[in-house]
Each structure stands twice: as structure tokens, then as C-alpha cells.
Amino acid sequence: MREKIFITTIALLFLAGCGQPAPDLDTYNPNPSGVDYNGTDDTNKAETVDIDETVYGNGTGNGQGHGNGHGGNNPNPNYDTSNKNYHGNNSSGGNFRSIYFDFARYAIVSKMENNMHHNNQVAKRASGTMKIEGNCDEFGTDEYNYALGLKRAKAVKDRISAQGVDTSKMVLISLGESNPTCRETTDSCYDKNRRVDIHLAR
Amino acid sequence: MKYLLILLLSINFLTSNLWGIDAKIRIEKDVEHRGRIALVDCSSSKNTKFFKILQADLKISGHFLANKNQYKGDFSNDYILPNLKSQDYVLKYKLNRSKLSVKLFQASTNKQIFKKDYNIPQSNKVPFLAHKSISDINKLLGYPDISWINRYVVYAVYTRAKHSEIRLADYTFNYTKTIVKGGLNLFPKWADKNQKSIYYTSYRELRPTLYKLNIYNGSKRKIASSEGMMVCSDVSKNGSKLLLTMAPNGQPDIYEFKVGSRSKRKITNFNGIDVNGKYINNESGIVFISNRLGYPNVFKKSISGSGVSQVAHHGRNNSACDAHGSNIVYVARESNSAFRQNKFNLYLTSSRSSSRRALTTTGANQFPRFNTDGSVVLFIKQRANSSSIGYTNLNSRQSLLFPFNGRKVQSIDW
């Protein structure tokens, strides 16, 4: 009996000390498949594409990459930005005025009511499609910031549509933090980036 | 004797439990079982950058204790320096342009246990030779798989207003390459486990449009578009289903999209913000970010049910997450300034418990992403005016930071 207890105890203590074992070089086969000794390996990292979206096909085609770097000469081909700098901090186009928002919020604040009223009147007369762009400061992350920009754009769209403007004439888009009008690290600068711009899409 | 047995059993039980809950004891125990390894550079000219990549590979594996010195040696013989005899292994390597030769020795006996040559066509992809050789050695020695170090990281960076680029990198960011440029192209996401294709959102058209791009032959297919926003947040294991954030009526919600039939169904339905859907629990449910409590936080729900429950129970601004199995990592903003660099930390939790573990404690840490087996979390750390790519091994609790001097990251996937 004593012998059994002794063996059991030793076994339990041994098990208690077991963790992830280091490889035992005396017992494992260093070359199980026979391919690693003196072998060669051409790592399979074939060359990848280099695509320039400004010259690359738009559709479902089989276009090859290797664009030639024409990107960026006309970053906003769909926008009428002739009204830039109108009325102070405005970055909207087509006589519209930008609407600015509080940090992390998407409700239209009372101090923006004048601009909103102005936009309603312009929207009623607009003949083309209005592109309503939501923008954010740089403090958000990833998807949430884009959603925040979208909710800001939707708040503006809802106010315009409440004036009887056909919703089919308005298109929403969130640009997240990708389109800052100001890049300084100041309070007023971040204020300028939390905004909705309206442009007439061509 | 009976009392002695009970006493010993009690000690054994208590000791086992302590190992289960006391991280310090467990780490020390793990350290004992890591392979001590020294690197001997036999190249014709010293290459410190390559040596550091090898060291990083060994460290992030969690299976090795790498000697910090870059020893010089002769590749043609089996001689091992006497002061390296106390190591478990000695790795001799010779790098010649884009060719790497390695030999692994058992240090105490001089016994060669592995020898292999590696080639890669492009010399700028040499970091992948280091990763491949270390993952091979790790496998040979019977440690858990680390082949994820061979994978590409895909990420988007802003270049100027309304412009971004999608780039590839090795996990150390010693190799980088732009694959998509021109205009605003965002939210790259690997489309398959073999990293042949990516999904990404193009802003070239009036509505954000999701494309699938083969990164090797350039073939590109339009998947879906939506007014407002379009993001591919997650891809199912077999690639047949996607979790998309779309806003067909200006309202951001999460949809499950079947690639084969191109059908979609709405998974969340809330008039605020629901984004960042990630599959959990064998794709039977999702975690996601929602502001349904008035601030962004992490929630979970089943794919088909309507009930939603809160996952993160601390913090007032948890605006991004990733998931692997039942594990969830999320970003918590822990300062509340609208006008200066905020403190963001990462926390690990589970869809099956309310416990959490801090993964970072300093700086602004964002964009957490699990690796393919869920053992390592990638993140971007911003401190003062510098940013880094960080990795933390959840098992060994070791962390690595690599300098990242690129532009502002928009999104990243591994």
C-alpha cells in the first residue's frame, strides 16, 4: 500500500510540474519528411500589382495593373467647387454653406440654423444632384468615424427634405477624416473639420 | 500516510490553480521552456537590419529566448564558439542579396539538425526570407505554428485630402509596397486565407463601391455599392460570406452578404450607429460597435436573433474592435479631450465572460487586429510625433514595436 501511495504521489508531483515541454532533441526525428536537409525553398512571394485608380478601368474587367502614376491631378472631378471660401469658413460649393458640428455629435446645433435656412433655399432652386458630404476630425478611428460623418450628412439631408426637396436629388457620402480643410493642431482647426459640405454633382 | 496523501494532493491542487491564475509564475515557467538561441552571421558583410528581423521573429514567436549579440562566424564549418555552448541552439546564417542559407545546431553537441537555402526573386522582399526560415525552424522543433509571420499586412494610408493608397508590408514593415493609388481607396480587407485578393472601398464613383482585387493579376470585380458608406468589416473563414457596413438609406447598419448569390440580409437595425461587425463563435454571432447607449461601445448579437448585449463594461468611448473565436480586443479611449492627443488603450475580453485584460498602458493604441490563429494582436501606437506598429503575443505576453514613419493609417488588415 505504501509503495502505491508513494508512486501515486511522485506521479502527481511530476504532472504538476509539466508545462509546455521544450523539444527533446534526443528523441525527436530532425528530418521527418526528408525535405529539410540540404533543401532549397523558393519562397512563393510573386510580384504584386501596382494600380492607379485614376487610369484603371472602372468596371468588372480584367485590367492589368502597373499604372503609370497619373494619379491626383483632378482629385474632385464630380464637384463644383467654384464657391470655395464663401462666407468665412465655407468649403461647400454651388452657393451652399458648410454646417459645423460639436465634437462626436451629429445633431445640428442652433448656431448653424442660419446656414441651414440658407441651404434649404438654395436646395429648393438647385437643378442638379446635390452631394452631401459628412466630415470628421482626426480623433475617431476606423469605421466609427465614417459612420459619424454619415450621420452628420443625413442630419442635413433630413432638414432639407423636410422643406419639400425631393430626396432623389440628394446623395449622401461620408468622407470620415479623409478631407480636412485644416491641418493645424488647434481647437479652431478641429472645429472646421467636423462639418458637412454640399456640392452640386456634375 | 492517508493524511500525507491528502496533504500532497491539496498542495498539488493549489499549485496547479496558482499556475492557472498567477501570470508571473506562468511566465517564469514559460521562460524556462523557451529555446535559448544565438544567431551567428556568416554573411560577407554585417547586416544589422536583417539580424534584427531574425531576432524579432524569434521573439514574437514566444518560443525562443534570442541572444542579443550578433556573432560573426564561418558558414563552411560546424565550429561553435565556446561561450555559446550554454545555448540550446545556434543558428548560423549567410545572406547574399536575395539568397539566405541557414544551419541550425544543437549547441552543446555541435550537432547540425537543420540546413536549408532560401531564394526570393525580389531583393526588397528579403525580410520574408528571415520569416520563412524562422517559421521553418520553429516547426522543426515542434513548437506551435507561427507561419503567420510569413503573411502580408495590407493597409491604407492617407496621402492628402481625399487621397489614399493601399499598401502591402511584411509584419515588421521592413518591406512595403503600394498596390493601389489614385483617389480615395479605403478599408482594405483580405478576401481569402491565402492572401490572393483583397476587398476595398473605392470612392471613384458617386457612391462608395466595394471591389474585389486579385493582387497578383490585377483582375477586379465590383461587389456592391451603397449610398453614404460601404465597408467590408469581416470575411468568413471560407470566404463565402462578408460582414458589410452599408447605409442604403443613410443609416449605417451591418449586413451579411453572400458572395455566391450576392444576396444580403440586415443583421442590425438601430437608428444610431452600428458598424465594425466581426464574426464570433464559429460565425454564429457578431460583435460590433454601436452608440445605442449614447456613446460608442462593444456589443454582441447572434446572426439571426434580435437580442443585443453589451460586451465591454468599462470606458465611455470604445470605438473599434476585432474578434477571433470568442476572444475580442477593443479600443478604449481613456482621456476625453476634443483638442489634443488622447490616450487609447487596448483590452482583451471574451464573448463568454465579462473579464478583461489590458494589453497596452501608454500612448494612443488603435486598429487592433488578431493574427490568423488569434495568438497575437497587431496595433498601431501613436506617441508624441512618432507612430509604431505594435504586436503583443497573448500567450507569452511579449510585445514588439517597429517604427512606422509613414503617413496616417486609415485601416489595416493582417
Image (cartoon, rainbow, N blue to C red):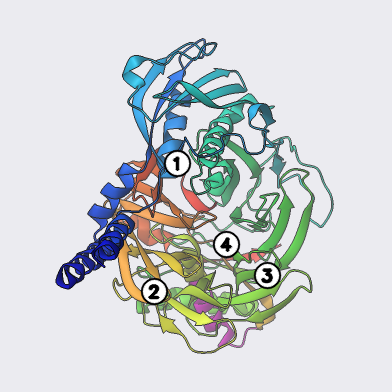
Q: Mark 3 lies on which chain?
A: B
Q: Which of marks 3 and 2 is nearer the N terminus?
A: 3
Which image quarter: residue B250?
bottom right
Label 1: few (<14), some or many (≥20) within 10 Å?
some
Amino acid type shown at disc 1 = Pro
Q: Give the residue pinned by disc 3.
A: B241
Q: Mark 2 lies on which chain?
A: B
**Is A188 on the left-hand or right-hand side of A163?**
left
Q: Which chain carries label 4?
A: A
- Residue at position x 31%, y 63% in the image: B357
| Of labels 2 and 1, the one closer to you | 1
The Cα–Cα distance between marks 3 and 2, rounded to whole angstroms, is: 25 Å
Amino acid type shown at disc 2 = Asn
The answer as to whether the residues below labels 3 and 2 share one chain is yes
Q: In which quarter of the image is the C terminus of chain A?
A: bottom right
The Cα–Cα distance between marks 3 and 4, rounded to whole angstroms, is: 40 Å
Label 4: few (<14), some or many (≥20) within 10 Å?
many
Going by the picture, which residue comes out furthest to the right? A61
Q: Is residue B120 shown above or below B393?
A: above
Q: Give the residue pinned by disc 1.
A: A23
Examine the residues drawn in magenta and state their main secondary structure.
Answer: helix
Q: Which mark is residue B297?
A: 2
Instruction: Check disc 4 and report its element: helix, strand or loop.
Output: loop
Amino acid type shown at disc 4 = Gly
- Residue at position x 61%, y 70% in the image: B243
Q: Give the residue pinned by disc 4.
A: A93
Range shown magenta: A152-165
For the question of whether residue B345 can be seen, the reply is yes
| Of labels 3 and 2, the one closer to you | 3
